[in-house]
Image (tube, helix red, strand yellow):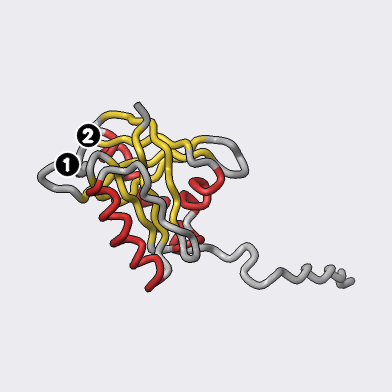
Amino acid sequence: MVGTARAAAPARAKGAGAPDLASDLFRTLNSVVEPVVRAGCFSPNLFAPTGLIVLETTGRRSGKPHRTPVLAMLMDGHLIVRTFRGERSAWFQNLRANPEVAYWSGGQKTLAQAIVHAPGEECHTAGLPPGAALGIAAAGMAVRMVGWRFAVLAPQN
């Protein structure tokens, strides 16, 4: 019996090809939650200002639309969305690359401009209603203290 030699498998970079369990979990959860939220369930409103929206961003590499359910807080007609994952959040990276977004809230699609905030970046509040500016100041503290990322979605008229 003749044995055959196999070529050694190429070494992989650390973490390359390793499953990202958090991303897989969120992808599965989002596929269930997105249709419900797009239909208007759990949307932030005057009586319950914090809720879920579906945020549509443009992929920074693909240029394709991506929809993600995210937690949002309604402040003076603007939405504040945040991520605890920091710069690892794909939707946040997409916002940085292209701040022209759309979101579904209350069963309706709205076009918006995202104003992104992160550590070391000034929180711009010029031209925003007072309630939205107050929400940005509060979220800005979380950015500085624990590294969260957030954006304000300003609806386009």
The percent coordinates of residue 128 (x first, y second) are 32, 43
Q: Total of numbered circles in the picture? A: 2
Would residue 150 be found to the left or right of residue 65 on screen? left
Residue at position x 28%, y 62% from top?
138
Sequence-wise, the earlier of marks 2 and 1 is 1
Residue at position x 58%, y 36% from top?
63
The percent coordinates of residue 31 (x first, y second) are 37, 44
Q: Looking at the image, is mark 2 or mark 1 nearer the viewer? A: 1
Task: Please name the amino acid that badge 2 sits on.
Answer: Gly
Q: Which mark is residue 45?
A: 1
Q: Quarter of the image for the N terminus: give it.
A: bottom right
Picture layout, residue 141 above or below residue 71: below
The residue most toward the top is 157
Q: Which quadrant of the structure image shows residue 84? A: bottom left
Q: Which quadrant of the structure image shows residue 112? A: top left
The percent coordinates of residue 25 (x first, y second) are 40, 58
Would residue 101 be found to the left or right of residue 38 on screen? right
Picture layout, residue 88 above or below residue 129: below
Q: Secondary structure at mark 2?
A: loop
Are circles 2 and 1 on residues that touch, CB within 8 Å? yes
Residue at position x 34%, y 51% from top?
81
Pointer 2 residue: 106
Q: Quarter of the image for the C terminus: give it.
A: top left
